[in-house]
Image: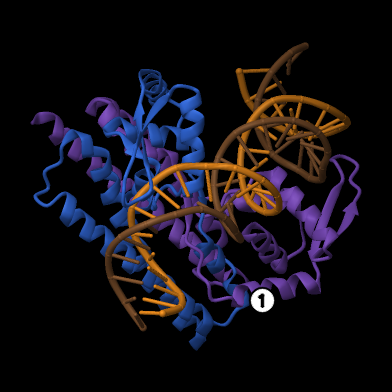
Chain colours: A purple, B blue, C brown, D orange
DNA sequence: TTATGATATGTGATAATGCACATAAATGTA
DNA sequence: TACATTTATGTGCATTATCACATATCATAA
């Protein structure tokens, strides 16, 4: 149900196509939400049937036709109502990388360190991407109200990446010491 | 498919019941994996059919009967093979709390701050739980190989919680300043 | 020149996950 | 005394999410 509100939230900023929404998820939300494009298209279809959103087809000569979705009053009301609910849902995380770390008793320290360096690289790249994004979208630290949420979660994402990288360095040290004993 | 390997990994340490495995997830893995008990029982059932694990029923007078699962050689081989694969799966996160933060353009700063304080409390409690756990299970920082993975991911969890708390304080400050303008 | 990647939207099948509920006895709490 | 919680394992159903595939055109790179 929460994906629905994520989509309505993005549409509350500006009308968008399913493709654009999928981009947004990848670009600015991967560190707290992931959604496959097929799921997004399906959810948009459902919401249109329930009249929470409406769509308009834009014909394009060079590229495939676009379908621009806009939020409707009913969708906006649902969104606000959901936001006002005071139940705070616990995060549901599926981090395969950390799950593999939890199985380090089954492999050698050397293999473990190699693995950690690989995951560190992924997070270093992730951080670089977010820093570039921040420079482009919030160059002078000026934040319009519209983008407040993105600004706050972007900072969270960068801290999340940095935190992982630091932990990685710590873990590699632990493993190196572990080997000496 | 990864839940399967998480379960096999836990069973590689010691035979356990489905109930105990569900406890483990809640106690030491919530910050990187969540699994409902019904899902765990089902996966164990499937794995037993595929002969990756075996079970033994223990009759208890006072409490319901137990079903203790043990890992079989075929399960162990599958697990090792999976660990040796060099594809690193990207984390799939569903954090409703951060998703709500991303919608802060729809509510007042005051409401946003109230919300952040609530989520901060959750993470403070989470951190306290993990610190208590660490004191109980790794009192003198001595880590047997068996518990290496748990030790490393526990530290990650504590850093994750601290990171959230610090970010929360930062975000609240940003919102307070935002209101003044 | 052939192949990938970006743009753009989807369907069908399957897998993963979660919710409500069921059972059943003991222990703890109001 | 009545209700909630812990221990312990599950089924049926619904929702959520992913994979493989389909279609179509342009731009860029090997």
Answer left or right for B62 relative to A12.
left
A53 or B142: nearer the viewer: B142
Residue A90 x/y as whole percent: 47, 61
Residue B48 x/y as whole percent: 46, 27
- The single residue placed furthest to the bottom in the displayed view is B180
- When the figure is inspected, residue A64 is found, relative to residue A8, above or below; the finding is above
A5 or A105: nearer the viewer: A105
Q: Secondary structure at mark 1?
A: helix
* Chain of residue at mark 1: A
| Residue pictured at 34% horizontal, 29% vertical | B70
Please count the marks in the image: 1
Instruction: Give the image quarter of residue B75.
Output: top left
Answer left or right for D9 relative to A174.
right
Q: Is residue A132 among the parts visible in the rendering?
A: no
Count neighbours of disc 1 (C-alpha within 10 A) and say few if under 14, some if 14 to 19, many if 20 or more.
Answer: few
Q: Is residue A3 among the parts visible in the rendering?
A: yes
| Residue pictured at 53% horizontal, 82% vertical | B111
Answer left or right for B140 relative to A170.
left
| Residue pictured at 43% horizontal, 49% vertical | A127
Instruction: List the residue tagged with mark 1.
Output: A81
B165 or A94: nearer the viewer: A94
Residue A81 x/y as whole percent: 66, 76
- When the figure is inspected, residue D4 is found, relative to residue B94, above or below; the finding is below
Residue A144 x/y as whole percent: 59, 73
A135 or A56: nearer the viewer: A56
């Amino acid at each position: 149900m929460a994906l629905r509100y994520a989509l309505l939230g993005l549409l509350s900023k500006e009308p968008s196509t399913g493709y654009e929404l999928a981009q947004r998820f990848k670009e600015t939300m991967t560190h707290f939400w992931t959604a496959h494009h097929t799921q997004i298209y399906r959810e948009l279809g459902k919401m249109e049937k329930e009249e929470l959103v409406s769509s308009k087809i834009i014909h394009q000569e060079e590229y495939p036709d676009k379908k621009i979705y806009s939020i409707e009053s009913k969708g906006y009301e649902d969104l606000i109502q959901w936001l006002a609910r005071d139940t705070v849902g616990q995060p549901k995380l599926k981090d395969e990388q950390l799950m593999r770390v939890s199985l380090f008793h089954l492999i050698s320290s050397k293999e473990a360190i190699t693995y950690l360096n690989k995951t560190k690289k992924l997070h270093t790249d992730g951080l670089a991407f977010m820093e570039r994004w921040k420079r482009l979208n919030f160059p002078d630290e000026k934040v319009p109200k519209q983008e407040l949420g993105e600004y706050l979660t972007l900072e969270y994402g960068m801290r999340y990446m940095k935190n992982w990288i630091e932990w990685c360095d710590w873990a590699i040290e632990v493993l190196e010491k572990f080997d000496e004993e």
